[in-house]
Amino acid sequence: MVIEEQNKSVPLYSISSAARMLNISVHTLRMYEREGLILPFKKDTHHRLYSEHDIERLKCIRKSIKEKKFTIPAIKTMYSFIPCWDIKKCSKDERDMCPAFLKSEGPCWSYHHSENSCSDKDCRNCNIYTDFNNCEKIREKIKEYTTK
């Protein structure tokens, strides 16, 4: 099972292939990236590549927009509710320096991290980004924290 999960994180699909798979435009994928909803892998040539996990995240985003009628700001807010500071066990001092904790305007991976435990990390490889790539996992984590 671990090998299968690792394979799902390998960036394979070009932006045009990902757009075709999702039946959306390349422009839409770039907009989702600008909005901080997705972090595609970028080659040295700046070409974007998407993994199976990225495709799963994009399906969640599309479902939220099309079926639930969520706006992009609503999706960003949903992602901001993932309590990264608690999952990563950040200290109070780290939380006090963390824009994701202080602002809650978008997912933690959309902020520039400096002077905290995430400053030297690649958000694309962070468990907060990788573990919450589908709607159900996000819902379950939020539900877990609201019923504590």
Image: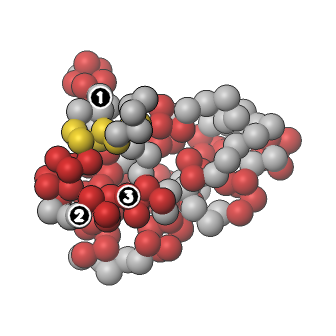
Amino acid type, residue under disc 1 in the picture: Val
The residue identified by callout 3 is 30
| Figure quadrant of the C terminus | bottom right
Q: In percent of the image, x 43 and y 29: which residue is there?
A: 44
Q: Is the residue marked by circle 2 packed among few (<14), some (14-19), or many (20+) residues within 10 Å?
A: some
83 or 70, which is in the foreground? 70
35 to 118, vertically: above or below: below
- Compute the Cα span from label 3 to label 2: 9 Å
Q: Position of residue 106 (x, y in %)?
A: 57, 62
| In this rendering, the label closer to the viewer, 2 or 1 | 2
Looking at the rendered structure, the secondary structure element under dot 2 is loop
The residue identified by callout 1 is 10
Q: In percent of the image, x 59 and y 40: which residue is there?
A: 87
Q: Position of residue 117 (x, y in %)?
A: 72, 33
Q: Is the residue marked by circle 1 packed among few (<14), some (14-19), or many (20+) residues within 10 Å?
A: some
Which label sits on residue 28?
A: none
90 to 120, vertically: above or below: below
Q: Is residue 144 left or right of residue 134?
A: right
Looking at the rendered structure, the secondary structure element under dot 1 is loop
Looking at the rendered structure, the secondary structure element under dot 3 is helix
Amino acid type, residue under disc 3 in the picture: Arg
Q: Position of residue 49 (x, y in %)?
A: 31, 39
134 to 126, vertically: above or below: below
Q: In percent of the image, x 47 and y 43: which residue is there?
A: 129
Outermost bottom residue:
69
The residue identified by callout 2 is 25
Q: In percent of the image, x 48 and y 31: which residue is there?
A: 125
| In this rendering, the label closer to the viewer, 1 or 3 | 3
The answer to which of marks 1 and 3 sits earlier in the sequence is: 1
